[in-house]
Image (spheres, rainbow, N blue to C red):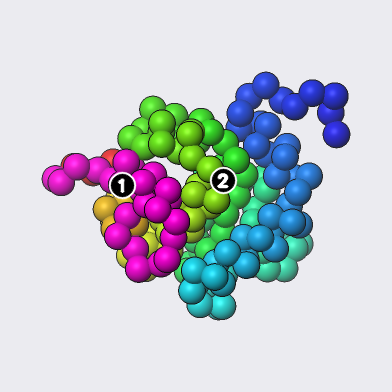
């Protein structure tokens, strides 16, 4: 471990994620199970690793593969993940459990809607998944106004 964490939030998040990747993989898979994600949609095949639910070197918050397998990544630890996008302040102030739930709900909706990020932004706040209210707060803040896309 370095003497001090990297000063850039994304670098710091990735550094932390590499150190705790195994624990985060277990926790992410458990949370997806608790939320009712079907077993065959939990995680994705990762070259050289087999199946994983947490990808420490990725920085987007989460992802889904062509088979609709869901993953999270180091972006959930990054308070600056959304930059200047809508929802950035809510994300930055949120508890980790709410960021995790928001990322899972977003990726779940994206996978259900043919990989459309815009459709996921529109529908994730109303997901049927039993996510924490703090996660819904983040997702509502990220939702584009009617008639807008990003």
The picture quadrant where one finds residue 149 is: top left
- The residue to which callout 2 is attached is 96
**Regarding mark 1 in the picture, which secondary structure is present there?**
helix
Q: What percent of the width, then of the height, locates residue 140?
A: 31, 47
- Residue at the (76%, 57%) spot, across then down: 22
Q: Residues within 10 Å of mark 2 (few under 14, many from 20)?
A: some
**Regarding mark 2 in the picture, which secondary structure is present there?**
helix
Q: What percent of the width, then of the height, locates residue 83?
A: 44, 29
Q: Is residue 65 above or below residue 2?
A: below
Q: Magenta span has 84?
A: no
Quadrant of the image for the N terminus? top right
From the viewer's side, name the closer residue of 91 and 123. Answer: 91
- Residue at the (62%, 44%) spot, across then down: 74
**Magenta segment, which residues?**
125-147
Is residue 61 visible in the rendered image? The answer is: no
Residue 140 marker: 1
Q: What percent of the width, then of the height, locates residue 129?
A: 41, 67
């Amino acid at each position: 471990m370095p003497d001090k964490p990297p000063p850039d939030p994304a670098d710091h998040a990735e550094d932390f994620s590499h150190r705790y990747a195994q624990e985060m993989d277990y926790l992410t898979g458990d949370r997806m199970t608790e939320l009712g994600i079907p077993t065959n949609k939990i995680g994705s095949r990762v070259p050289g690793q087999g199946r994983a639910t947490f990808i420490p070197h990725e920085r987007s918050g989460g992802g889904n593969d062509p088979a609709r397998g869901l993953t999270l990544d180091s972006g959930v630890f990054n308070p600056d993940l959304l930059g200047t996008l809508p929802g950035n302040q809510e994300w930055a102030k949120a508890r980790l459990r709410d960021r995790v739930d928001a990322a899972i709900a977003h990726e779940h909706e994206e996978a259900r809607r043919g990989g459309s990020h815009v459709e996921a932004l529109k529908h994730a706040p109303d997901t049927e998944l039993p996510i924490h209210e703090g996660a819904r707060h983040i997702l509502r803040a990220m939702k584009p106004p009617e008639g807008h896309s990003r």
